[in-house]
Amino acid sequence: MEKTKRLRAALLSSPGMGHLVPVIELGKRLVADHGFEATVFVLPSRAAHAEAEIIESAMIPKLLNIVDLPPPDLSAAGLGPDATVGTRLVVMMREARPAFRSALAAMEAQPDVLIVDLFGTEHLCIGDELGIPKYVYVTSNAWYLALLIYSPTLDKEVKGEYVDRTELLEIPGCKPVRPEDVVDPMLDRSNQQYREYVRRAGELLMGDGILMNVWEDLQAETLAALRNEEFLGRVVSVPVYTVGPLIRPVRPSGLGTELLEWLDKQPSESVLFVSFGSGGTMSGEQLVELAWGLELSQQRFVWVLRKPTVKSLDGSFFDVGKGGVGDEVSSFLPSGFMERTHNIGFIIPSWAPQMDILNHPSVGGFLSHCGWNSTLESIVNGVPMVAWPLYAEQRLNATLLTEEIGVAVRPKELPSKKIVGREEIEKLVRTIMVEKEGHMIRARVKELKSKAEKALTKGGTSYESLSKMKEDCRMKIHHIKKAH
């Protein structure tokens, strides 16, 4: 009997850790568990240190081929100095299309399947040109996907700005969305970012399927709504495959000696990890309140500290890993903070090996910006969260984590709208680390940790979902060949 040919997958990642990590991890799963050959095409940002580490660690087991695409020339793209991160990402991906085409043409053998992330939907046409199945990988959650897919309908039905509404935004079969929780592109309908967002929502369904970085148990109701015939008839016309949680692996050597020694001395689950992802920043005033809140809570902490920003909350998205805070640290912290907290706190400048820290037994809480990678890393390590959303879809994620999944607490008002005071921060930290409510949340997140692990093993929902995608892919290839 003829041996079944290994399928060759080409995966395209847009810049930024939030996309690169899950795309690389998906490539590794396709190779290790499902017999694919995989090449990941990476469009680098200026986040050299953090991204280089991820790419390097992915290449060590030699599971993947990784190809760096040349940085696109944006000079003719008409990007203004105030262009949002979302607009810049879309334009970078658009301008990279000729380079991606050339890179695919230079491959020894043409790929059998194309997988792009959400910022790469304009590349789906290349799948049509090559006559191969094409998929979109949404590296976030099902509620976000439902809102995105429904956005062209909301665009027609809702007049004025979404954030000015008093009524909830209804999505068939899903939890409605509060106007203040909408994703960044929906904050200003006159901005290019919004037009690009609605366009991508339409293009999303031009693929042969959508892959999602969640597992079935995590959002069963929302996934059912997305797959519902009625919802399907109106909006979604392609299968949705749950393939998560795909997160970066723990590297035992990832923690520096000094940090590892410090963590090893702390009691089990006694340390709060404070980090706002690879792109998040905050104002100087908020930084001071956060420092006071941590000190007043009297809880141990590891804090990834980045210079404050006055411009935007995603201020370091394209600069992660650049420079540290070094000796300047004391200049934007309360006077005497370092001396008063030297027994209970450990400060890391700019960037840290997050997964390795969350995996350490002494870490028992995570004050997080609620990026989806960070959220999954926290759940997979059984660590409850203080949700501190900043930008992108993080407000939506924070509401999901606190109100639906039940693994986090959050400030009364959005940190993006109002300075969160030290007393409230102290209370949130103590709730997660020592109060009864925190113990209940901890039990819930540990239950989810166990379900997440099962989902990825053979016979688990995510493993089987990726197997189904492979089967469907083969069928699609067969139909395409027959048609030609």
Image: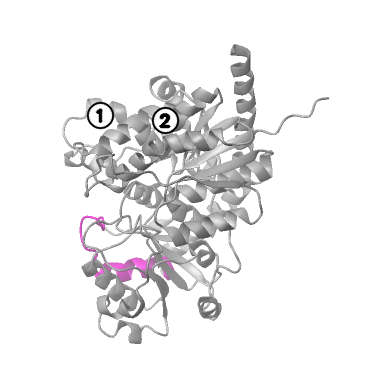
Reply yes or no: does residue 301 show up in magenta.
Answer: no
At label 2, the amino acid type is Leu
Tag 1 secondary structure: helix
Specify the quadrant that holds the N terminus: top right
View extreme (right): residue: 1
In this view, the mark in front (2 or 1): 2
Residue labelled with disc 2: 204
Q: In the rendered view, does 386 fall on the left or right side of 75? A: right
Question: Magenta part of the protein: which range?
Answer: 413-434
**Vertical placement of residue 295 versus 215, above or below:** below
Q: Secondary structure at mark 2?
A: helix
Asked whether the viewer can see residue 49, the reply is yes
Name the residue that disc number 1 marks: 155
Q: Which mark is residue 99?
A: none
Number of numbered callouts drawn: 2
Q: Residues within 10 Å of mark 1 (few under 14, many from 20)?
A: some
- Amino acid at pointer 1: Asp
How far across and how far down the image is residue 206, in percent?
44, 25
How would you rate the neighbour count of disc 2 (Cα within 10 Å): few for under 14, some for 14-19, many for 20 or more? many
Residue 294 left/right relative to 180: right
* Residue 423 among magenta residues: yes
Whether pointer 2 and pointer 1 mark residues with C-beta atoms closer than 8 Å, the reply is no
Colouring chosen for the image of the structure: one colour
